[in-house]
Structure formats: C-alpha cells, structure tokens
Image (spheres, grey):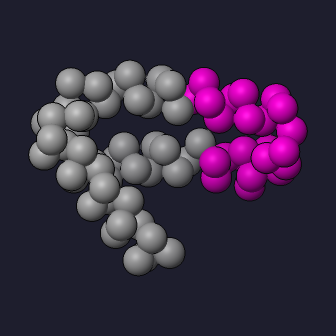
Amino acid sequence: MKRRREANIRALQVAQEKGQIRADLDIEAYLDAILGVFYYQSVARGVNFTDQGTTQRCREALEVIWHGMEP
C-alpha cells in the first residue's frame, strides 16, 4: 500500500507542477479524501462496487473533490 500511495502522491505532485490542480493543495489530505470515498463505501457501508448506486455515489463524491482541486 505504501508504494501505491507514494505513486498517487507523485502523480498529484506532477499535476500540481503542471498547474492542473491548485498550487496550495495539501496533496496528502486530498489523496486521503479520494481514497476515503472508496474506503467508506466498502468498509462502513459494506456495499459492492458493482452496484449502480455505489458507483454513482463515488462519482459524485469525486466530482466534489475534483472541483475543490481545480486551479
């Protein structure tokens, strides 16, 4: 998991360097928010990701997070 997290952090850093996401972002906090969407659905709600409602909730949550990241 650590290696995967580091790769995701680096990808967000590259996007930040290119101006694709806000320069003032706390990248680790945003990665936690993104991953938390899926963790909550899986662990707290115990739902299957093949369920259409689950997929829609995740999409909408990621939209909210993404809009907060836009420059």
Q: Position of residue 43 (x, y in %)?
A: 74, 55
Report the front residue among 20 and 40.
20
In the current view of this chain or complex, which residue is farthest to the front?
A: 18
Q: Quadrant of residue 30?
A: top left
Q: Using the rendered image of the protein, determine whether residue 24 is visible from the camera's viewpoint.
A: no
User: Is residue 63 in view from this perspective?
Assistant: yes
Q: Is residue 12 left or right of residue 2?
A: left
Q: What x and y, as percent, mark residue 31?
A: 40, 50
What span is colored magenta in the figure?
Answer: 38-61
As for residue 67 lying within the magenta part, the answer is no
> Residue 7 location in percent, x, y?
36, 67
Please indicate whether residue 40 sits to the left or right of residue 21 in the image: right
Residue at position x 34%, y 47% in the image: 29
User: For this rendering, which residue is in front, 17 or 30?
Assistant: 17
Residue 13 falls left or right of residue 35: left
Position above or below: 44 against 4: above
Q: How many marks?
A: 0
**Residue drawn at 44 percent across, 51 percent down:** 32
